[in-house]
C-alpha cells in the first residue's frame, strides 16, 4: 500500500511540474505576442514610401471626434485595456485581437480572436496582413518580435472590375418621397436596388404559384449592395443546379440588395445638405422599409398570377455590420406594422452578420484614428485593391473585391472635381461614403442593439467570425435558445465576401429550416397558478 501511494505521489508531482512548465511557456508567449502588437501599433503607416510618392496616408485630426468623449483614448491604450475577450455572462468588456497594421474603417465591430480570422479594422486593432495573389510579403510575423510586418506589393495582377450583371439579374432605381412625417421618418431619395429572382421558371416556390421567399440584404459601412453579389452568384448557381430529386432552398428565394443612404449609387434627397448625409439608423431603416414596399408592389404588378399579387411576401431580413443595426430596426418596424394591420410583408427571419453590441461599443474609442489612417484617394483600382487586401482589412477574396470595392469608389480629378470637368486632369479614385459624416452616429447605431434584436419575434440567427464576442445579454439569450448562432472562424469581418459559399449555405439552411419546412415551436414553460392546478386536478378526476 505504501509503495502504491509513493508511485501515485510521484505521478502527481510530475503532473504538477509539467502543468507549471506549460503555464510558464504560455505566459511567455503571451508577453512576446503583446510586445509585437504594441510595436506594430506604434509603427509608422508609411513604411512603403507613400509619402515620397505623394500619396495621402494620414490626415489632420477631425474636429468631429476631437471633441468626442473618446478623443483622448488612443488605439494603443485601447489595446492594453481590453486584452481579455468577452467572457460570456461574466460581463467583462470585449477585446478585439491586435494584429499588424492600421487599416481602413468599416464601422464599430470588433473581431474574433480565433485562429485563421481576418480582424475587423474598426476595433482599434489593425488586421493581420497576409500576402494575397501577386503580393509579396516583406519581413514576417516571426516570433522574435524584431519589428512590424510589412506587406509590399511587388506585382499584383491588374484588377478588372466585375459588372453587377454577373451576380444580379437587374439593377433599378427606386424613388422615395419624403412623405408624411407622422407616418414615416424617411427623408426621401433615389435608392439603387439589385435583385435576382432565383425561383424556377414558373416564378414560384411551390405548385400554387406563390411568390418566393425574399431575402432583404442590407450592407455595412462603407460597403454597397454589391457586397452581396458573391453570395447571390453562388445561390443562383445552386438554384440552377436543382433538379426534381435534389431541390435547393435557393430555388425558392429572391434576393433584394439596396445601397443605403450615403452609400453607392443611392442619392439622398432632403431640404438641406446636412440632412442628405444623415446616417441616423431610424432614418436609414425607414429608407429601407419604403424602398422594400415599392419593390414588393412593383414586383407584384409585374407578375401575371393572382396568387402572387394576393399573397403577402415572406421576408428574411439580413444585415451585415452597420446594416445589421438597420436590419434589426427594419424587422421590428415591419412586425409593428403587421400587428397594426398595415403590414405588406411577413417577417419570417432575421439574420445579423458579424455585429455584436458589446464589441462594437468597446471599439468606438479607436475608430477616429483608423479613419484618419485611411487614404483619401488612389491612383488606380489596383492600388486600392492592394491597400484594401493588405492594410485596409478588406476581403482577401479577389473575386469578391473585384465587384465590391469598385462600387465604393468614384472617379475624380486631382483638383477634386468631376472626371468630365477637365480633360487634362489626372484620374484618381475617391471613396463615395464620407466616413467622417458618420462619426456622430456611431453610438446610435449599436446602442440597444442586443435588446432590439432579441425583441424581434421571428426566428433569428447570428453569424459570427468567432465565438468569444457575445455580450452578456446575448450570451444569456443564446443559452436559453432564443436565437441560433453560427461561426465561420476562418472568415474576416466581411464574411459574405471572404466566404460566400459558406454564407450561402447558412442562408439556405435557415430558409429551409424556418421558412420552407418550419418546425413546430414547443409551448413556452410557465408555472401554473394554484387555481389552474386545482382546475386540472378536478378535470382529471372527472
Image (spheres, rainbow, N blue to C red):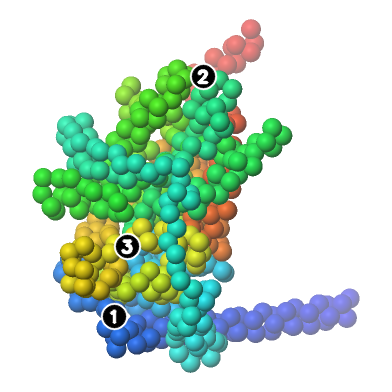
Q: Which mark is residue 55?
A: 1
Residue 360 appears at what percent x and percent y? 37, 60
Q: Of circles 3 and 2, which is in front?
A: 3
- Which residue, given by chain and number where applicable, does mark 2 sit on? 532
Above or below — where is 40 with respect to 409? below
Mark sitting earlier along the chain (3/2): 3
Crowding at mark 3 (Cα within 10 Å: few <14, some 14-19, many 20+): many
Above or below — where is 185 with respect to 15? above
Mark sitting earlier along the chain (1/2): 1
Residue under the image location 18 percent in, 50 percent down: 276
Residue under the image location 18 percent in, 68 percent down: 422
Q: Which mark is residue 409?
A: 3
Front residue of 408 and 314:
408
- Element assignment for label 2: helix
To which quarter of the image does residue 425 belong?
Answer: bottom left
Residue 115 appears at what percent x and percent y? 57, 69
* CA distance separating discs 1 and 3: 16 Å
Crowding at mark 2 (Cα within 10 Å: few <14, some 14-19, many 20+): few
- Element assignment for label 1: loop
Front residue of 32 and 111:
111
Amino acid at each position: 500500500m505504501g509503495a502504491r501511494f509513493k508511485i501515485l505521489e510521484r505521478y502527481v508531482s510530475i503532473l504538477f511540474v509539467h502543468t507549471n512548465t506549460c503555464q510558464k511557456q504560455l505566459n511567455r508567449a503571451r508577453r512576446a505576442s503583446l510586445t509585437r502588437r504594441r510595436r506594430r501599433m506604434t509603427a509608422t503607416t508609411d513604411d512603403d514610401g507613400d509619402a515620397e510618392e505623394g500619396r495621402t496616408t494620414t490626415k489632420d485630426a477631425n474636429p468631429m471626434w476631437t471633441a468626442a468623449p473618446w478623443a483622448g483614448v488612443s488605439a494603443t491604450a485601447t489595446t492594453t485595456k481590453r486584452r481579455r475577450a468577452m467572457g460570456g455572462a461574466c460581463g467583462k468588456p470585449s477585446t478585439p485581437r491586435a494584429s499588424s497594421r492600421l487599416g481602413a474603417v468599416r464601422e464599430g465591430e470588433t473581431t474574433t480572436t480565433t485562429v485563421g480570422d481576418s480582424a475587423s479594422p474598426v476595433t482599434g486593432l489593425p488586421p493581420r496582413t497576409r500576402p494575397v495573389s501577386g503580393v509579396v510579403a516583406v519581413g514576417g510575423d516571426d516570433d522574435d518580435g524584431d519589428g512590424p510586418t510589412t506587406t509590399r506589393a511587388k506585382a499584383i495582377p491588374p484588377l478588372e472590375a466585375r459588372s453587377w450583371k454577373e451576380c444580379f439579374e437587374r439593377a433599378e432605381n427606386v424613388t422615395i418621397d419624403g412623405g408624411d412625417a407622422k407616418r414615416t421618418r424617411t427623408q426621401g431619395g433615389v435608392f439603387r436596388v439589385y435583385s435576382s429572382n432565383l425561383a424556377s421558371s414558373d416564378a414560384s416556390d411551390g405548385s400554387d404559384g406563390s411568390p418566393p421567399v425574399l431575402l432583404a440584404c442590407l450592407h455595412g459601412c462603407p460597403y454597397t449592395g454589391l457586397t452581396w453579389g458573391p453570395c447571390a452568384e453562388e445561390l443562383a448557381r445552386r438554384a440552377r443546379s436543382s433538379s426534381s430529386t435534389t431541390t435547393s432552398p435557393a430555388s425558392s428565394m429572391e434576393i433584394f440588395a439596396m445601397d443605403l443612404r450615403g452609400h453607392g449609387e443611392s442619392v439622398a434627397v432632403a431640404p438641406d445638405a446636412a440632412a442628405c448625409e444623415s446616417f441616423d439608423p431610424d432614418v436609414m431603416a425607414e429608407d429601407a422599409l419604403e424602398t422594400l414596399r415599392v419593390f414588393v408592389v412593383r414586383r407584384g404588378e409585374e407578375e401575371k398570377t393572382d396568387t402572387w399579387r394576393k399573397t403577402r411576401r415572406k421576408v428574411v431580413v439580413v444585415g451585415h455590420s452597420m446594416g445589421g443595426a438597420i436590419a434589426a430596426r427594419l424587422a421590428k418596424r415591419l412586425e409593428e406594422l403587421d400587428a397594426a394591420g398595415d403590414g405588406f410583408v411577413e417577417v419570417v427571419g432575421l439574420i445579423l452578420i458579424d455585429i455584436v453590441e458589446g464589441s462594437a461599443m468597446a471599439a468606438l474609442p479607436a475608430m477616429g484614428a483608423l479613419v484618419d489612417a485611411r487614404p483619401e484617394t488612389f491612383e488606380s483600382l489596383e492600388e486600392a485593391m492592394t491597400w484594401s487586401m493588405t492594410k485596409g482589412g478588406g476581403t482577401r477574396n479577389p473575386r469578391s473585391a473585384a465587384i465590391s470595392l469598385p462600387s465604393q469608389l468614384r472617379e475624380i480629378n486631382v483638383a477634386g472635381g468631376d472626371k468630365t470637368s477637365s480633360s487634362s486632369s489626372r484620374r484618381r479614385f475617391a471613396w463615395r461614403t464620407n466616413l467622417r459624416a458618420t462619426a456622430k452616429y456611431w453610438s446610435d447605431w449599436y446602442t440597444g442593439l442586443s435588446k432590439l434584436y432579441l425583441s424581434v419575434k421571428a426566428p433569428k440567427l447570428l453569424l459570427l467570425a468567432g465565438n468569444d464576442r457575445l455580450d452578456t445579454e446575448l450570451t444569456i439569450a443564446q443559452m436559453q435558445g432564443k436565437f441560433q448562432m453560427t461561426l465561420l472562424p476562418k472568415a474576416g469581418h466581411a464574411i459574405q465576401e471572404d466566404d460566400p459559399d459558406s454564407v450561402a449555405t447558412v442562408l439556405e439552411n435557415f430558409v429551409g429550416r424556418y421558412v420552407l419546412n418550419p418546425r413546430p415551436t414547443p409551448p413556452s414553460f410557465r408555472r401554473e397558478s394554484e387555481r389552474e392546478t386545482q382546475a386540472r386536478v378536478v378535470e382529471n378526476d372527472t
